[in-house]
Amino acid sequence: MGPVLRCAGPVLVGLLIAACGAAPSQPSTPDSAVAPASPVASDTRLILTYYYYWYDASTGRHLDPAGGIRYHLPPVPAPSWRSVAWHERQFSDMAQAGIDIALADYWGFDNPADDWSWKGLAPMAQAWHALRNSGGHPPRIGLFLDTPIIRWRDLTTESGKAYLYANFRDFFSRIPRDEWALVDGRPVAFLFTSDQTSAVNQASFDYVYTHFQADFGVRPYIVREVSWDYPILRWTNGVRVRDFQHPIKTDNSYLWAAAVHGYVDRGGVAAVGPGYDDHLVPGRGAGMFADRAGGSFYKKNFRAAIASHKSLLVIETWNEIHEGSGIEETVEFGRTYIDLTRPLADAFHAAK
């Protein structure tokens, strides 16, 4: 996802953003019925966050003020997907915040305009090992598949299923196995919304499971956004036609847009965020806004997520600065949200 609007719940919004190579996105609620929450498959309590590594101080990409940056990253180390030092700082700060898993926001392997997506994984992996070898405890690395890259493919066809799986295969081939984020011994993969998919069904995911098992000897732990809960048969006059009789099953699910609406008891993974502000992003008009309220919005919703007794909690986001949803160190907030997160993370890890 470039700096694109990602909102869920009752608000139905679809925007095509040209800034910073952004892709279109739409809301993440299913069109009608709500599928039962997926069961949490592990007794281990884990905190995850979405890690945006597309920044490049050497070219200014995704750092250009004209792209609508709401908050600003510290200049040292220079934020760049190319920089081992920058990745190392991010992982160190995540560990300080009590985060267990960094979900790398991956834009696929086949678009030369977004070559940072795969080229950035090598310095990321190098940074992880450097931190571990120096006695640090970096979060393990999982996949956050940025699904606008699907670009309206039909994932029920053989070519569509193969394309979906190829992204899993490429990502986990580039991240060393000892760095993989695992739930029940299985590598973790989150999917963003289904809104750029022309058709999908259970066979689309079965293909991924089967081929990943064949190639890596283990099944992935797939966490779908709830817009994947039911098959998309087709689009008619701009409306998704769903099959509500045959819910799609993966290992777990979550609801996007916690940064906007706070914690909502939906899916098997609890989602929280600190607030949201994308009004500077070109093409979004007035944009959307969720007041951070000095950190109280974040703390309130984090506590609600702890009270849900869900074993997995995802923070939206670590460092998406165009939408103002990050908890990373910034010029504006310093390390406030890292410091706020740690006691909440400790409480989550200790909860029964």
Image (tube, grey):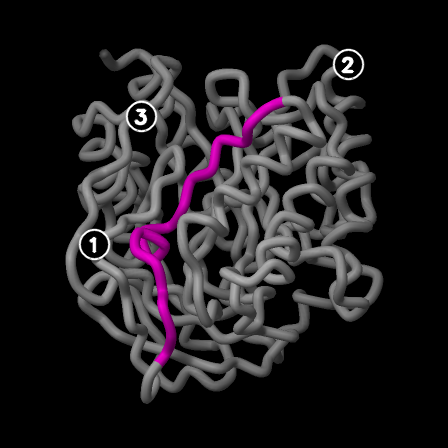
Which one is earlier in the sequence, the residue at label 1 or at label 2? 2
Q: Which residue is mark 1?
A: 245
The tag earlier along the polypeptide, 3 or 1, is 3
Give the residue type that dot 2 points to: Ser
Name the quadrant containing residue 240.
Answer: bottom left
**Which residue is tagged 2?**
134
Residue highlighted by disc 3: 40
Q: CA distance from mark 3 to mark 2?
A: 34 Å
Task: Name the residue at 76% across, 32% down.
Answer: 125
Are dots 3 and 2 in contact, CB under 8 Å? Answer: no
Residue 341: horizontal and vertical position, in percent?
Answer: 39, 31
Mark 1 or mark 2: which is in front?
Answer: 1
The answer to whether the residues at label 1 and label 2 have Cβ atoms under 8 Å apart is no
The numbered mark, 3 or 2, whose residue comes first in the sequence reads 3
Residue under the point 67% across and 16% down: 136
Q: CA distance from mark 3 to mark 1?
A: 23 Å
- Residue 167 belongs to magenta span: no
The quadrant holding residue 84 is top right
